[in-house]
Every structure is written in structure tokens, then in C-alpha cells.
Amino acid sequence: MIKKNSFQPESRSPTNPSYPPSSPAWLASTIFACAVPISLVYVFLTRSSGVGPGFTVPLAGLVAIVGIVAGSGTRSPTGREWLVTAALFTTFWAFYGATRPLTATPFNEQVRLADAILHGHLWINAPAWMEAVRYGGHSYVIHPPLAALLLLPVVAIYGLATDQVTCSVFVGALDVALAWHLLGRFRLDCASRLWLTLFFGAGTIVWFEATRGTTWSLPLVISLAPTLCALSELFGSARPWLVGLFASAAALARYDLVAVWPLYAVALALRGRKPRELAALLPAFIFATAAYIAYNLARFGTACDLAPWLFYRVDPAGLRDHPGLPGPFALRNIPSNLYTLLFLSPDLDARFPYFHPSFRGQALIFTSPAFILTLRARLRRPLVAMMWLCCLFGSAGVLMFYANGAVQFGPRFYIQIFPFLLCLMALGMARRLDQLTLVLILLSILLVGSGVWDIAHSGFAG
């Protein structure tokens, strides 16, 4: 049983009679219905342009029709809640599928690693354009392994022909559905919860990264799902073993998130869990650490991950090593990365709409200004402070990294902390949606949507 504390009046919990939140009976059908015209328009446009549509968007449309029929007979609040979650997944599945590039990405490191694992080794056949490090006569991927492990069933069927973007679109839609589920843990009315969910899915660069599905995008998109689940559990039943399981999975998708592990323990203590109960976090943490060490031993013969250092010390042409260079992580890199995160502006020229995404990225305020609403959360509340610390610890690694992300829309290295920022937005909101919140969310959707459109039609500026 969770003890009552200073946070309890602000949240829903299984001991609260208002949990789970009850969605209006019409909401699921309305959201499902949005997927149908998206699918029809997409099929019409792709057919008329002579490019055959993929299966994702038409399939999402069919699922939406089934959902509308199924939803008409749902009466229980719990059933309606899960139906709305399924409706948001289906609609964003169609939406992301309709706004993705029509061709598969050639930057499919995770597909190649999954195929390598199925063939009994960890080295990959890396073309010249793909980021990889050479060690012991083989090429190895740089990014964490969870994305490749999740792709194993699909790659087992389709092999190297697997379209990594299709998988990314699916996971991105799942992220949005999980964001809706997480927001149900807070005292928000249905409109506030829905608009915050729409902001997360269409007003942040999650939209862009989910529809790109590249070597760099997919790990970020996959890291969101376990983090959203961990936070949903933290603000819900607060079972330490389950929080530990999800937090461990998130760290195997983005290594930066290992720094958040101690903060989950503190947050669980603030939710009333005793020290002996917090020990249930350890098995998952130990397993993830052991998996990380085993992965590195199999590649480099050491417990440490050499990939970032090996990649950093080879010049772009891959001709020679620079052993005298400092490592890829250093305090001197923080100012430039903070500039990218907080101040870097889009490029301006005479082409409509005049402001264009720069390949260098742009500050969070120029893609998702609604994140300003995080400042409404009162810092004197312990769990608010914990969420801010999660943002800081979860981004500490990339703040010290020698590169800011390069060819990117917005500061993509910081996507892994978006779930914590979403919690702060929810913690700072009144029970009902106010005008400022609505304006900022709509502005965010406009900025991200225009950026996605501009990059798709004109490429990056600068």
C-alpha cells in the first residue's frame, strides 16, 4: 500500500476511487474515426502518384474501423480507457505512416545487427556510409543493442529487406499511446490529458524521429516506451520491481538513462516505499548491467564500451587514428550543447515559410515551445524536483558529448528526457485546460508540422 504523502493529493493511484480515469464514451470512436480519412487520403494520393502504398496506413485504417465497431459495445470505464489508448495508437500509426518517407532508409544499423545476431555473431557488414567502428578486423555498431533485439522477429522473416522505418512508425505510435496512459496518473480532465498527448505525438520532434527510423532515430524512439512505462508505474502502483524492469530496458536503448536509476529509487521512497522494498529494483539493474558487460566483452574483450572512443579517434575519411585526442566526453562541450538545446535558431531566407530547419538542429523552444509549461510545476514539491533531476541526469552524457547531433531537426539527443518533461507539464497544469496551454500546444504542432513538411520537400537549410 502506498503511503499518503505530499504528492498523493495531486495524483491518481489504485487506492483512489477515481482511478482508472474514465474517458467519455464517444472519445475512442472519435479518435478511431480520425485514422480512416488519413488512410483513405494516403491510399488515393500514393495510387494517383504511381507509388503503391505500403501496408501500414491501410492496415491502420482497417483496425480503426474494427475499433469503431468494437467501441460501440463498451460500457465499463476501464474498457473505455483501454479503447482510447488503442485508438490513439491506431490513429498515430496511420498518421506517422502517412508522413514518413516513401522509401526505406539506407541507415539501418539495427536491422543489420539483428541479422548478424541471427547468424551467430555481433559484427556487421557496414557500407561506407554507415557509422561503425573497426576492431579486430570487424565492424561493430555504435548504438545500444535493445533496438536490434526487438527487431529480431521481424528480421527473422524479412532479413536485410526489413524496412526499419515501418518498425519505427509502429514504436512511435506506441509511445504516444503510452504517453496517454501515463497522463492518466495525474489529476487532469479529459481535454487536458488529450491535448498533452497530442503535443507529445505531434508537437515534439518525436513525430520527425519516428517517421525517419534511421540508425540514430530508432534507439531514441524505442527508449521512450520503457521510460513512459516506468513513470506510469512510478505514479501509479509504484511497484519497485516493475519500475526497475522498465528503467533497465530504457538504459539498454539509450545508455544515458542509466544515470536516472538512483533517482527512481528516491522517487519510489517519496511514494512511500520502504528501503527493503526498494531492493526489488536491483535484479533488473544487475541483469541489464551484466548484459551490457557481456555485449562489450563479446565485441571488444573488455567490460567497457570502446565504440564511442574508437569512432571519435578516427578521422572522417577513416584513414588514420588520432590516439592523442581527448575522449568524446568532456566538460568543455557543455556550453556548445546548451546553446543547441536552448538558443540555436532556425535559418532565415527569402523562401516561404522563411524560417527553415537547419541541419545543425535548433533549440527546443523553436520546435516545442509548450515545454515552457514545465516551469509551472512547483519546485518545492519533492517529486517535481525529482523529475527535474531526471532531466539533468538523463541528458548529462549528451551535454558533455563532442557533437550536438548534427543533421537533425531540433535537439534530437534530448528526446530521451521528454517523458520527464511531460510529467512536469502534467504536474504544473490545473485540472482544466487553459488558453495559454492550448495556444502553446497548437504553436508547437504548427512548428513541428511545418518543419517536417519543409524537410520532406526542400531538405535541411544551411
Image (cartoon, grey):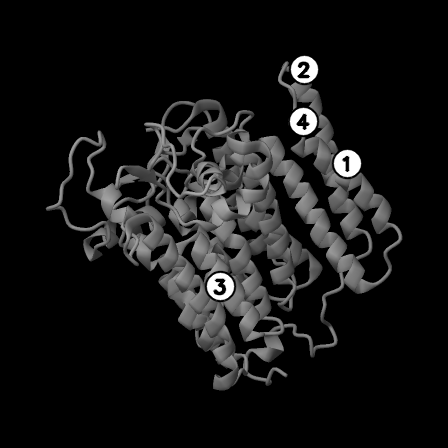
Question: Which of labels 3 and 2 is toward the front?
Answer: 3
Is residue 170 visible in this depiction of the protein? Answer: yes
Question: In this figure, which residue is indicated by the disc labeled 4?
Answer: 42
Left or right: 426 as drawn, with respect to 77: left
Question: Which of labels 1 and 2 is toward the front?
Answer: 1
**At x 61% / y 78%, what residue is drawn?**
9
Q: How many marks?
A: 4
**At x 74% / y 35%, what residue is drawn?**
61
Q: CA distance from mark 1 to mark 3?
A: 34 Å
Q: CA distance from mark 1 to mark 4?
A: 13 Å
Disc 3 crowd, CA 10 A, few/some/many (<14, 14-19, 20+): many
Q: The residue under label 2 is which amino acid type?
A: Ser
Question: In this figure, which residue is indicated by the disc labeled 3?
Answer: 247
Q: Work out whether residue 23 or residue 89 is closer to the camera in this orientation and state it.
A: 89
- Please say if the residues under marks 1 and 2 sit with CB atoms less than 8 Å apart: no
Q: CA distance from mark 4 to mark 2?
A: 10 Å
Instruction: Please give the label number shown on residue 9.
Output: none
Q: CA distance from mark 1 to mark 2?
A: 21 Å
Is residue 391 visible in this depiction of the protein? Answer: no
Q: The residue under label 4 is which amino acid type?
A: Tyr
Question: Which of labels 1 and 4 is toward the front?
Answer: 1
Question: In this figure, which residue is indicated by the disc labeled 2?
Answer: 48
Q: Earlier in the sequence, mark 1 or mark 4?
A: 4
**At x 62% / y 31%, what residue is drawn?**
98
Q: Earlier in the sequence, mark 3 or mark 2?
A: 2
Question: In this figure, which residue is indicated by the disc labeled 1?
Answer: 62
Q: Earlier in the sequence, mark 1 or mark 3?
A: 1
Left or right: 26 as drawn, with respect to 421: right
Pinpoint residue 416: horizontal percent, then vertical percent.
45, 54
Q: Is residue 164 above or below residue 298?
A: above
